[in-house]
C-alpha cells in the first residue's frame, strides 16, 4: 500500500478510507475498469464518502453525487482519491 503526501494532501486508494471519511476522486490505477467506473459516476473531481462496509468486507457502499454506489473491493481498490 503506497501513499503519497503533497502539502498535507494524501493520495490513497478508495479502499483505504474509513467509514464516514470523505475524499475527492483523483484518478484510476488501471484502465481496466475506468470506463465502467466513470459511467457509474466515479469521475475525477467528484466528492465521495465511504458509507458502509458489508459484514464480510465486500461490497463497500459509497455516497457519490447524491446516491449510494456499491462496489466490489477489487473495483474500489483501483480508484485513487485525495484525502486532506
Image (cartoon, rainbow, N blue to C red):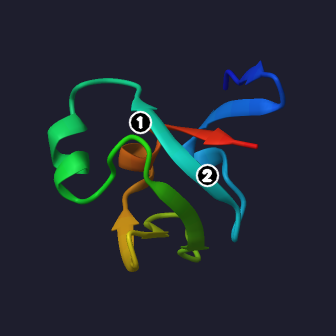
Q: Quadrant of residue 64?
A: bottom left
Q: Is residue 13 visible?
A: yes
Question: Which x, y percent locates residue 3?
Answer: 71, 24
Q: Which of marks 1 and 2 is in front?
A: 2
Indicate left or right for 8 with 47 as reference: right
Spatial CA distance of label 1 from label 2 is 15 Å
Marking on residue 49: none
Say which of 56 and 47 sits in front: 47
Give the structural element (helix, strand or loop) at label 1.
loop
The residue beneath circle 2 is 23
Indicate left or right for 35 with 73 as reference: left
Q: Is residue 33 above or below residue 36?
A: above
Q: In this view, does 69 lie above or below 42?
A: below
Query: Which quarter of the rendered picture does the C terminus lie within?
Result: top right
Give the structural element (helix, strand or loop) at label 2.
strand
The residue beneath circle 1 is 78
Indicate left or right for 6 with 77 as reference: right
Amino acid at each position: 500500500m503506497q501513499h503519497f503526501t503533497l502539502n498535507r494532501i494524501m493520495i490513497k486508494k478508495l479502499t483505504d478510507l474509513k467509514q464516514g471519511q470523505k475524499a475527492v476522486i483523483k484518478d484510476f490505477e488501471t484502465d481496466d475498469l475506468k470506463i465502467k467506473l466513470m459511467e457509474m459516476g466515479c469521475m475525477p473531481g467528484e466528492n465521495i464518502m465511504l458509507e458502509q462496509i458489508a459484514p464480510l468486507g465486500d461490497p463497500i457502499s459509497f455516497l457519490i453525487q447524491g446516491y449510494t454506489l456499491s462496489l466490489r473491493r477489487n473495483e474500489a481498490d483501483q480508484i485513487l482519491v485525495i484525502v486532506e
